[in-house]
Image (spheres, rainbow, N blue to C red):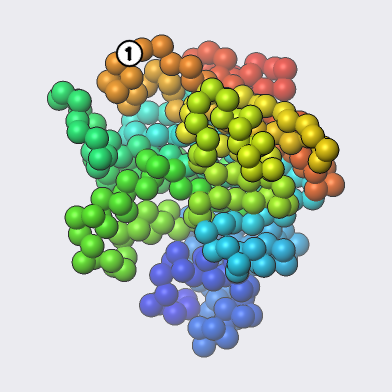
Amino acid sequence: MGNPRLSERDFIDLFKRKGATSLAKHLGITKRGVYERRRSIESRLGIKLTAPNSAGGVIREAEQRVAKEYPHRAALAVKNGLVIVGSDFHIWPGQESVALRAFKVLCKDLKPCAVILNGDVLDFPKISRHPPIGWENTPSPIEEIEAAQEHLHEIAQACGRARKIWTLGNHDARFETRLATVASEYKGISGIHLSDHFPLWEKGWSVWINDSVVCKHRWKGGVHATHNNTVGSGKTMVTGHLHSQKVTPYTDYNGTRYGIDTGCVADPDHKAFLDYTEDAPKNWVSGFAVLKFKDGKLMQPELCTVWDSKSVQFRGEVIRV
């Protein structure tokens, strides 16, 4: 079944980057051994592992170049296809927001070439640098991780062969920040990295699509963040963090680009937000974004937005989820 000392996460990463032939040489085993382990992982996790430059491959020469020069970035080349981007899931056990249900549905129905979780998939209130508010009851890290594993497994199954990328958000970073602060001696041990618990998802600070669209969790703040993001970066920039959901076009001599806030996949009225917002009104919108590319160029960005407790609005229709 391949080299038993190679972790599942490392096998998945190496297979996506090298393919069966190169991986077999790297591990000193036969291609048959590589394929046997791939089939075992695919069967157990309900996924498809795609080798580079195969018919369904997503890593191309330009992507490999960027990955080598900027290891903190994920590079994505999309000529014609869709990319679904959701942010600020803030997953707690025992809850599934309307937007999260819709995210899974559209991942299956739209058949995107990539799915991007644009930060703050997890919440981690118990390991926040902020003190607890009163006697609030919040989930433990393991409870959140197990809940997120279940939801992300369903997303992975829904989107099939799509590339799966997770940009780190400030709430996600709490996991390793806490361990690095109080238990730095455990550096390098399996399990202390958030990615150890989610091996299917590539991790990084940002995703660069066609070198013209940048997805990252946050940059500028305030009500004019989307405008300032695209003006300041010179790129179309897709962010979350502010939960506000909007698309701001900006046109200059270089053409039109966009600042996009995807909103929050979480329910703005969920109890995770109740105490620290002190039940104040929130200028938040629950939903996510769909990016369509034609001949390598981004078309008008689309937003999927929660309509009511059972439905979302998308492309002029109300869709029950």
Identify the residue at horizontal 64%, vertical 63% (top origin): 66
Is 309 situated left or right of 94 in this image? right
Q: Amino acid at mark 1?
A: Asp
Q: Residues within 10 Å of mark 1 (few under 14, many from 20)?
A: few
Residue 161 position in % (x across, y down): 64, 53
Q: Nearer the viewer, residue 25 or 251?
A: 251
- Tag 1, which secondary structure? loop
Location of the C terminus by quadrant is top right
Q: Position of residue 33 (x, y in %)?
A: 53, 79
Task: Identify which residue, 306 or 239, lies in the foreground.
Answer: 239
Name above or below for residue 232 compared with residue 68. Answer: above
Residue 168 placed where, x, y %? 46, 48
Residue name at image x 65 percent, y 33 percent: 259
**Residue 285 vertical placement versus 46 (above, below):** above
In the rendered picture of this protein, how many numbered marks are placed on residues?
A: 1
**Circle 1 residue:** 279
Vertical order, 299 against 202 (above or below): above
